[in-house]
Image: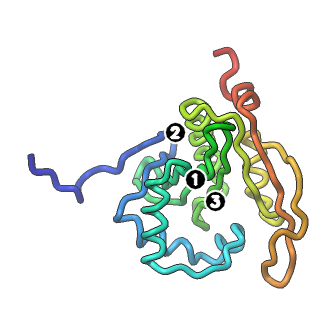
Amino acid sequence: MNTNITNMKPIRFLEGERIYLRPFGEEDTAAYFQTLFNPETRRLTGTKQAFTMEGVRRYIEEKSGNHDTILLLIALSDNDQMIGDIALQDIDYVNRNANMRIALDNGEHLGKGYGPEAIRLLLEYAYGILNLHRIELQVFDYNKRAIKAYEKVGFKREGVQRDALYYQHRYHDSIIMSMLEEEYRALYHQGQ
């Protein structure tokens, strides 16, 4: 059987209405590398370090083969365009908790609900397949759009790490947010 890998459609690991989440492929390294230098994305995520293509390739390879991390690309359903990434990290299967992070590219894809849709897909997988109990995240106080998106899907503020990030000549607070499985089920699985 002779199959041309370059003509294969991307795997749709978790599929929503307008987006889907899929694993990284080798062909994604260059595009992902470019997104790491978007100034606004770097500011919103508090990213300070520079990256090399080889370092990004190793990171993707390491995370993709790691049982305590699920790293996925966010792509548009209608044209397969990559618009960001999302991850469950530090998965603790004993205590049934994990940390979540998401980054969308800037510009035309922000403010359209893609972030909340991607988060709901990952939460469905985390609570429904992995049987996790608690998902937490951290967001910097100046990232108002992200805070609103997290609250929209049901995350609750737990606390604040004061002056946790030094960025652009100022200290910024980091807000800790979380969602428990029963909160998720009450929001998304009523009557089931």
Name the side, left or right, on which 106 lies relative to 165: left
Name the side, left or right, on which 186 lies relative to 158: left
Q: Residue at x 48, y 40 (%)?
A: 14
Residue, disc 1: 87
Disc 3 or 2, which lies upstream in sequence? 2
Residue, disc 3: 110
> x%, y% of residue 86?
57, 54
The C terminus appears in which quarter of the rendering?
A: top right
Cα–Cα span, label 1 and label 2: 19 Å
Name the side, left or right, on which 37 lies relative to 9: right
Report crowding for label 3: few under 14, some 14 to 19, many 20 or more residues within 10 A (C-alpha). few
Cα–Cα span, label 1 and label 3: 18 Å
Q: Are marks 1 and 2 in contact (CB under 8 Å)?
A: no
Q: Amino acid at mark 1?
A: Ala
Q: Secondary structure at mark 1?
A: strand
Badge number at residue 17? 2
> x%, y% of residue 32?
48, 68
Cα–Cα span, label 3 and label 2: 17 Å
Q: Residue at x 50, y 47 (%)?
A: 19
Report crowding for label 2: few under 14, some 14 to 19, many 20 or more residues within 10 A (C-alpha). few
